[in-house]
């Protein structure tokens, strides 16, 4: 719980009831454990317990959202800064630190993440304006350097030189864990190849956040991420996902949700269970549960805003006999007519089936090998 406008000097009163009045800014948003730590050296334990226990429950706890007009940018209290700078953990070693940051609610950041961001020589940021708000809120003065998908190849060597010179470099994305559908994967790989220390600082992730609250199986899942924009590539990926028994997790831009639902209904089937998670940890957080067919009806006419994580249950494992040769032939014919190569058509048809790929490939050669050769001529 965080206390606002509690005057610590009011406990000098002989009355056992606490007095609340405006105080200096540094105490207005002080976490309760740090606040009591501040009071302990100055007042008897009995008086301190009486005072803290009398804090009224009507005081407003602080919640923050990147979309809320009421999100505060007040500097973090001095006690928090003192705690971060005097952590019992030793000084950081030079290296690349991949720091998870909130996906919405600014309270979803760890003390370790704050300590690393404060101690780093430079912070690589996907959008310096966006990340600047987070750093300003926690009164972190570390310099920011832009690092995004349009300049990561050019920045990589500069960052590598900084790391090899013994600097501490922190990498953050706009939200969540760096390298997960965000810049960072290539830089981490480069550092590993060059024997530069890479340290993960765990934090929020939209994938795990959505999965944990989805009600779908969590023991096995596939993170698909953003789908390709090219129609053929996108359909290939959806076909592969539809044949997986694990829960499938997608990142869907709101303006592409209608297209995704149409294609998912066609490939996964309308009866497959799904979950739409939107604006997680933010003011307008929403979890919607139903079938893909019901999702089409619910969202095709509704224009959503905000980040969407979409989950679809995996394919049920059937003990029935495998598909017949005629079924396999029909699937192969459809894929080849759409422009897929013979090998890709075989791969897509074999996905999720008990039939060995070698058997399907032999069938494809018998049925369509001559046709493809004549087309090549």
Image: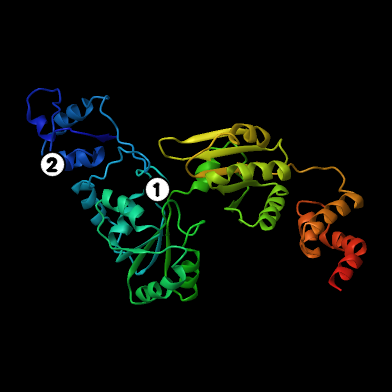
Measuring from the top left, give residue 12's x and y in whole percent. 7, 30
Q: Nearer the viewer, residue 129 or 12?
A: 129
Q: Are marks 2 and 1 in contact (CB under 8 Å)?
A: no
Residue at which label 1 appears: 102
The x, y position of residue 65, in whole percent, is: 36, 40
In front: 38, or 210? Answer: 210
Q: Quadrant of residue 357?
A: bottom right
Q: Can residue 86 be spotted in the picture?
A: no
Compared with 208, 193 (above or below) is below
Can you say which quadrant of the picture contains the N terminus? top left
10 Å crowding of disc 1: few (<14), some (14-19), many (20+)? many
161 left or right, relative to 220: left
On the rendered image, what quadrant is the C terminus found in?
Answer: bottom right
First in residue order: circle 2 vs circle 1: 2
Q: Reply above or below: 146 against 2.
A: below
Left or right, residue 56 beside residue 206: left
């Amino acid at each position: 719980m965080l206390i606002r406008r509690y005057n610590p000097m009011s406990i000098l009163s002989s009355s056992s009831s606490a007095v609340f009045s405006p105080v200096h800014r540094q105490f207005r948003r002080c976490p309760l454990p740090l606040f009591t730590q501040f009071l302990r050296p100055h007042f008897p334990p009995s008086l301190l317990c009486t005072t803290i226990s009398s804090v009224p429950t009507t005081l407003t706890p602080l919640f923050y959202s990147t979309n809320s007009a009421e999100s505060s940018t007040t500097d973090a209290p001095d006690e928090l800064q003192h705690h971060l700078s005097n952590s019992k953990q030793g000084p950081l070693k030079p290296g690349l630190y991949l720091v998870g940051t909130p996906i919405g609610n600014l309270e979803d950041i760890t003390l370790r993440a704050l300590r690393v961001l404060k101690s780093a020589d430079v912070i690589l940021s996907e959008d310096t304006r966006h990340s600047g708000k987070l750093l300003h809120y926690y009164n972190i003065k570390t310099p920011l350097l832009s690092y995004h998908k349009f300049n990561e190849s050019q920045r990589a060597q500069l960052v590598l030189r900084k790391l090899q010179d013994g600097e501490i470099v922190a990498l953050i994305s706009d939200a969540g864990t760096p390298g997960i559908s965000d810049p960072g994967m290539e830089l981490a790989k480069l550092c590993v190849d060059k024997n530069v220390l890479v340290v993960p600082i765990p934090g929020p992730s939209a994938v795990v956040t959505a999965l944990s609250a989805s009600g779908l199986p969590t023991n096995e899942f596939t993170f698909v991420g953003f789908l390709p924009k090219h129609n053929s590539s996108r359909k290939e990926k959806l076909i592969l996902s539809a044949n997986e028994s694990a829960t499938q997790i997608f990142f869907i831009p709101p303006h592409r949700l209608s297209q995704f639902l149409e294609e998912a209904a066609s490939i996964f089937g309308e009866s497959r269970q799904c979950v739409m998670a939107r604006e997680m940890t933010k003011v307008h957080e929403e979890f919607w549960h139903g079938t893909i067919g019901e999702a089409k009806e619910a969202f095709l006419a509704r224009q959503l805003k905000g980040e969407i994580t979409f989950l679809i249950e995996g394919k049920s494992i059937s003990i029935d006999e495998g598909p017949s040769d005629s079924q396999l032939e029909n699937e192969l014919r459809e894929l080849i007519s759409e422009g897929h190569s013979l090998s890709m058509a075989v791969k897509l048809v074999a996905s999720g089936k008990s039939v060995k790929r070698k058997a399907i490939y032999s069938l494809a050669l018998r049925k369509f090998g001559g046709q493809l050769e004549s087309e090549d001529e």
